Amino acid sequence: MDIEDEMKKMSNQQHNSPNSGELQRSLSNRHLQLIAIGGAIGTGLFMGSGKTISLAGPSILVIYMIIGFMVFLVMRALGELLLSNLNYKSFIDFSTDLIGPWAGYFVGWTYWLCWITIGIADLSAIIYYLQFFNHGLPFTPLEGVMISVAAIIFIMGLNLVTVKLFGELEFWFALIKIIAIVVLIGVGLWMIFTGFTSDTGHVASFTHIWSHGGIFPTGAMGFLAGFQIAIFAFVGVELVGTTAAETKDPEKNLPKAINSIPIRIIIFYVLALLIVMSVTPWNQINPNISPFVNLFSQAGIAAAAIIMNLVVLSSVMSSMNSGVFSTSRMLFGLSREQQAPQNFARLNKRAVPANALYFSSVCLLLGAALQYFVPDTVRAFTLATTLSTILFICVWLIIMWSYIVYYKTRPALHAKSTFKLPGGLFTCAVVILFFLSMIVVLALESDTRQALMVSPIWFVILIIGYFGFYKPKNK
């Protein structure tokens, strides 16, 4: 114990040196709560839910509840780990400490790529939703690239200012998403209780949930296929863990943000999609159109559809904003562990890791080329989101592995924890088996199987990088 304390003291002295600088705890509870909500309402919900409904029908409600519960358990494990040692700033720190340097290297670089692929998917979504304002006409590949570049430069500029500005922007982005979904639920309920008849002749009613083939109309295969895209809707919820290093009073605010995840999932996913499928039967929903936008279009409210498109666009920008923030913090953490170029650990005068930010933005710019080579935005979105989902599952599995090591090797810390993971090791086993089974499910459909087949290339690159360049020296 004395040796551990001494090592912590030395680490703190090193991290607080003028050359290295420290991330500032500038995010308040208000920011953290809304960042957590923003992470739970992403592009996957607004853009991906249409395809998920077409695959699984009303069983999408069951799918979202199952995945939401599993992700919540991951977040509880993450919360207990981060609060067990406030020197832990992110996944990199506790996975390095508990499993080993290779785990910190793996999770840090993989999480970085997760958000890069999400950023690329978001670029596809931005182009797709802007088509609404282009009379529904697709943009040329060159126009798509120009839109992507403009979006990246805008987000990079915002992130370069201060951490507090990031928190403030996410607060308002998340608030817009919350208001939009609450309004959608309100309008949908009004349509249901007034017996609204759509242009297609369907009367809005809760009976649509079970009267078009039942809750599981596409059978077991359709139900399993629904998990593929639905998982992507939840990626980013662990952003709360990334922001922990820059949050005031984490012992109080982190548990509050994590414990409110289940109620958010019920309201923003289950209730919202229950309303959507009650207004329009699941088999009448176009998989290529956001069901949220479609609901207002069905009602014949043109202005509301325009507003909803703007809301969805703000949601995508919010996701990109979070992504650029996360990638820069991951590179900052990797650099501190000597597993990335040391320049990434430098902070500018506003305590922002600017060099890491520039590098991530340049990688996103390279990703914008996907818009040129894969002009079909829906296909580009599916490829990027599937790869991202695979990588996020790997990150979540490392978090659970870290928890198992912590539980077994730090029993005193676990015993005094005031924010324990319910079920302990049994819960870990259930969560790990669930996410491993999800990797198998991703092989069922041809479009998601392509990304699954490509993903091992990343792991080969990581192995070469770790043993060839950034393997830390024995201390």
Image: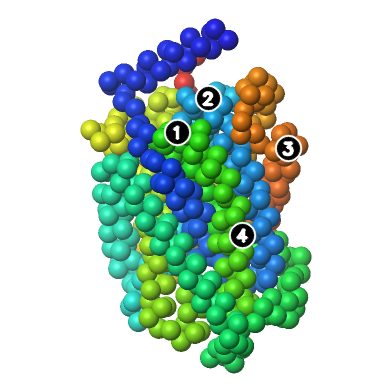
Secondary structure under the numbered disc 4 in the rendered image: helix
**Above or below, comparing residue 93 to residue 52 in the picture:** above
Dot label at residue 85 = 2
Q: Residue furthest top?
A: 2
Q: Position of residue 11 (x, y in %)?
A: 43, 17
Which label sits in the foreground, 2 or 1?
1
Spatial CA span between label 3 and label 1:
26 Å
Residue 412 is at least partly visible in this image: yes
Secondary structure under the numbered disc 2 in the rendered image: loop
Spatial CA span between label 2 and label 3:
21 Å
Dot 1 amino acid type:
Asp
Q: Which residue is at 40% across, 72% downward?
A: 309
Q: Earlier in the sequence, mark 2 or mark 1?
A: 2
Q: Which residue is at 62% across, 75% downward?
A: 277
Please say if the residues under marks 3 and 1 sit with CB atoms less than 8 Å apart.
no
Dot 3 amino acid type:
Gly
Please say if the residues under marks 4 and 3 sit with CB atoms less than 8 Å apart.
no
Mark 2: few/some/many CA within 10 Å (<14, 14-19, 20+): few
Q: Position of residue 239 (x, y in %)?
A: 48, 44
Q: Earlier in the sequence, mark 4 or mark 3?
A: 4
User: Which residue in the protein does label 4 denote?
Assistant: 266
Secondary structure under the numbered disc 3 in the rendered image: loop
Q: Nearer the viewer, residue 414 or 56?
A: 414
Spatial CA span between label 2 and label 1:
13 Å
Q: Position of residue 159 (x, y in %)?
A: 30, 46
User: Which residue in the protein does label 1 denote?
Assistant: 249
Q: Earlier in the sequence, mark 2 or mark 3?
A: 2
User: Which residue in the protein does label 3 denote?
Assistant: 423
Please say if the residues under marks 1 and 4 sit with CB atoms less than 8 Å apart.
no
| 251 left or right of 448 in image | left
Mark 1: few/some/many CA within 10 Å (<14, 14-19, 20+): few
